[in-house]
Image (cartoon, rainbow, N blue to C red):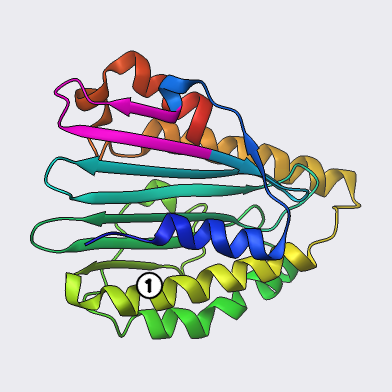
Amino acid sequence: MQFKFNQTILNSLSERMKLEEIPLTEDLKKKDSLSKEKKIKNKLYKSEKIERVVLTEILTSDSIENHNGLIYPGECYDFPIFDFMFHLFEEGMLAVTEFYLLRKDKSYLEKYIFPMKELYQEAQKIPEPMPNTFEWIKEFSSGHGFFLGSTKEHLPEIEKIFKSYLELWIGYVEKAEPIADPTLKDSASNFKKKFCTVFHENVSDFDNLYGNFGEEWTERYYREVIY
């Protein structure tokens, strides 16, 4: 079984906007684990309104796959950060998609969060919805993404709801106008920096990157690729 989430993002974005690949050093593009049992692949892209599209893929010798990444708005925009994480295990899969907020005033919520409610309700019908128990993430979370501990049989449903979230988010990007208010622009920029700092400090090392790829390389990955 192969995941298609990274390719879905790349295809969907490429159909709606011009993407430019951001160069990475060869060792950050592709890296074998210390044991040679895992391989990580990374790609970065940008567009007129998007600062960075991060696509990470982790493969193991037994074909278990992980796809995850983040998409950041450009410095003149304040649409939400798009986050996704999909982990395939022998016994099932973990599926996460969330929009992280750069502001939380009423107009921002009405513009970006309220349209997510219908998708959220649909996602909750896929077994099994799980609560997000990380307190530190709540400052940024929309509260309307999905966090599912599911099985491989539900992969088609998960792919479908993921595509719906992605299409909604791309619509936000297409309609986005540069921030005119300097105060709001600074606020969005500072909040994005805070997001990267907080996530780097708190995100659990779910894939055991430090153990698999070494501390020095993993810190470079977090600093130069994803955060």
Q: Residue at x 54, y 56 (%)?
A: 10
Q: How many marks?
A: 1
Q: Residue at x 51, y 76 (%)?
A: 164
Q: Secondary structure at mark 1?
A: helix
Above/below status of 31 relative to 49? above
Q: To which residue does mark 1 refer?
A: 159
View extreme (top): residue: 216
Instruction: Residue 50 in the image: state x and y as whole percent.
Output: 69, 48
Q: Residue at x 44, y 55 (%)?
A: 6
Residue 2 visible in rendering? yes
Instruction: Residue 227 in the image: state x and y as whole percent.
Output: 51, 34
Mark 1 residue type: Glu
Instruction: Residue 204 in the image: state x and y as whole percent.
Output: 29, 39
Based on the picture, tell me whether residue 36 belongs to the magenta stretch: yes
Instruction: Residue 189 in the image: state x and y as whole percent.
Output: 71, 40
Would you say 99 lies left or right of 89 here? Answer: right
Look at the image and give the residue range highlighted in magenta: 29-43
Along the line of sight, which residue is nearer the eye, 27 or 122?
Answer: 27
Q: Residue at x 33, y 26 (%)?
A: 31
Along the line of sight, which residue is nearer the eye, 143 or 8?
Answer: 8
| Magenta stretch: dominant secondary structure | strand
View extreme (left): residue: 91
Residue 99 visible in rendering? no
Q: Quadrant of residue 11?
A: bottom right
Would you say 53 lies left or right of 217 here? Answer: right
Would you say 180 lies left or right of 111 here? Answer: right
Q: Quadrant of residue 190?
A: top right
Based on the picture, tell me whether residue 95 belongs to the magenta stretch: no
Q: Which corner quadrant holds the N terminus?
A: bottom left
- Within 10 angstroms of label 1, few (less than 14), some, or many (20 or more) residues? some
Q: Quadrant of residue 84?
A: bottom left
